[in-house]
Image (spheres, helix red, strand yellow):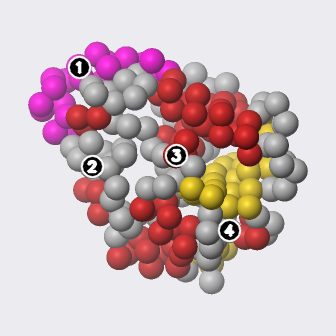
Amino acid sequence: MRIAFLRHGPTEWNALGRVQGHTDIPLSAEGLAKMQGLRPPPPFDAARAFASPLLRARQTAAAFGLLNPALDARLMEQNWGRWEGLSRDEILARDGTEAFNRAGLAASFQPPGGESTQTLMDRVAAFLKDAARHDNDAIAIAHLGVLRAAYTLASGWDMATPMPAELDVSRMLVLEVEASGDCRIHALNLDLQKL
């Protein structure tokens, strides 16, 4: 089966460069208008729909006309703990210029009071395995961290290097998922349709 991952639409905190994590921020007015003007391409416009339970993902699903998506907490953004609500500059000013290095690299990265990237990857892997129990294609409205985790699981990217340039999180990432949960990239940067 194939599953398309799409990041939620823009929020006020996105515009301000603030870490959102589990903080339940709604779409901005501009973000909602943008999402209402787009639709997933076939067959994902009529596929089984999943969404993170966070408001910004649910609003994006509704804007796309994906009614009653199955809400799955495994699709939530990484919990950034005490860094949520702060910008990168504020984190560095408060916790020092080595804050991100001290938190660790790649899968071992864990912000203070938050969850590790490995924990995020484990929950995305569990979601993929469960979703693959059905043959029908699906779409999942999620978050940046979830797309990065899905990409990592499908490609073997080590996450210690910058995000690959070819992964555009404003477009869809489509994975081919085996019943075992093993996956590979089916399509990168699949465009949404404009209304």
Which of discs 2 and 1 lies nearer the camera? The answer is: 2
Identify the magenta region: 87-108
Residue at mark 2 to residue at mark 3: CA–CA distance? 22 Å
Element on which disc 2 rests: loop
Magenta stretch prevailing secondary structure = helix
Q: What is the three-letter code of the residue carrying label 1? A: Glu
**How many labels were placed on the picture?**
4
Q: Earlier in the sequence, mark 2 or mark 3?
A: 2
Check residue 73 in the rendering and tell me which mark sits there, or answer none: 3
Label of residue 16 in the image: none
Residue found at x 72% / y 70%: 45
Could you say whether the residue bearing mark 4 is in a helix, strand or loop? loop
Residue count near mark 1 (Cα–Cα under 10 Å), binned few <14, some 14–19, many ≥20: few
Q: Does any portion of residue 190 appear in the rendered image?
A: no
- In the image, 52: left or right of 115? right
Mark 4 is on which residue type?
Pro
Secondary structure state at the residue bearing disc 1: loop
Percent coordinates x, y for residue 87 in the rendering: 23, 44
C-alpha separation, residue under disc 2 versus residue under disc 1: 19 Å
In the displayed structure, 44 sits above or below 62; it is above
**Residue that badge 1 annotates:** 98
Q: Amino acid at mark 2?
A: Arg
The reply to whether the magenta stretch includes residue 137 is no
Gap between marks 4 and 2, in whole Å?
27 Å
- Cα gap from disc 3 to disc 1, whole angstroms: 31 Å
Res 61 → quadrant: bottom right
Horizontal relation, residue 94 to residue 23: left or right: left
The residue singled out by tag 4 in the image is 40
Q: Earlier in the sequence, mark 3 or mark 1?
A: 3
- What residue lies at 24% left-to-right and 23% top-to-bottom? 99
On the image, numbered disc 2 is attached to which residue? 18
Label 2 crowd bin: few (<14), some (14–19), many (20+), radius 10 Å: some
